[in-house]
Image (cartoon, grey):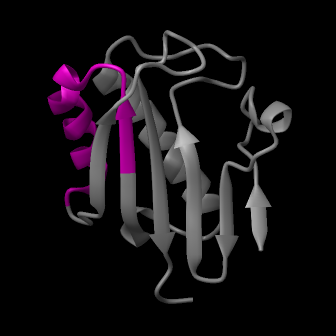
């Protein structure tokens, strides 16, 4: 089983004790990704911008274990402002419109840093090894 952190590492992985991505055989799980960079700075102002950054981080994590966007079977999107769901959905669609994984979007009361507006998780299945 591969358990990998972010490169460069995020500010929370070691302190909290989790992996950014875990691969067990054909199954891959990517932990919630936000727009926080390795220095703890939240990038992006709008939920759409933050979603696009989080999705880039998901794609990077997938690539580290031999997976791609085409292997994603499920995503979960969390936001502090569901009224901005259209722009978050557009960012998701820009990456997954052809793949069309099952997904859900949830409104939450907040994240670790109040500047964070979006967090996205992904699960993948690598069909062809």
Q: Residue at x 21, y 39 (%)?
A: 89
Q: Pick the quarter of the image with the C terminus.
A: bottom right
Q: Is residue 126 left or right of residue 2?
A: left
Quadrant of residue 39 within the rendered picture? top right
Q: Quadrant of residue 10?
A: top right
Q: Main secondary structure of the magenta part?
A: helix
For the image, the number of numbered tags is 0
Q: Is residue 125 above or below residue 3?
A: below
> Measured from the top left, where is residue 46 in percent x and y?
32, 15
Q: Nearer the viewer, residue 70 or 22?
A: 22
Residue at x-position 76% and y-position 37%: 13
- Look at the image and give the residue range highlighted in magenta: 76-97
Q: Between residues 11 and 108, which one lies in front from this camera angle? A: 108
Does the magenta segment cover residue 117? no
Of 116 and 36, nearer the camera is 116
**85 left or right, relative to 128:** left
Q: Residue at x 76, y 46 (%)?
A: 18
Residue 94 among those drawn in magenta = yes
């Amino acid at each position: 089983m591969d358990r990998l952190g972010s490169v460069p590492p995020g500010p929370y992985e070691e302190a909290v004790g989790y992996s950014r991505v875990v691969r067990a055989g054909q199954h891959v799980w990517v932990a919630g990704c936000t727009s926080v960079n390795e220095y703890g700075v939240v990038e992006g102002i709008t939920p759409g911008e933050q979603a696009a950054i989080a999705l880039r981080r998901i794609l990077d994590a997938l690539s580290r274990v031999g997976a791609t966007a085409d292997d994603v079977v499920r995503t979960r999107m969390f936001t502090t402002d569901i009224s901005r769901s259209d722009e978050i959905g557009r960012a998701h669609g820009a990456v997954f419109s052809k793949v069309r994984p099952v997904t859900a979007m949830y409104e939450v009361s907040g994240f670790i840093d109040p500047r964070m507006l979006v967090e996205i998780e992904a699960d993948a299945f690598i069909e062809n090894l």
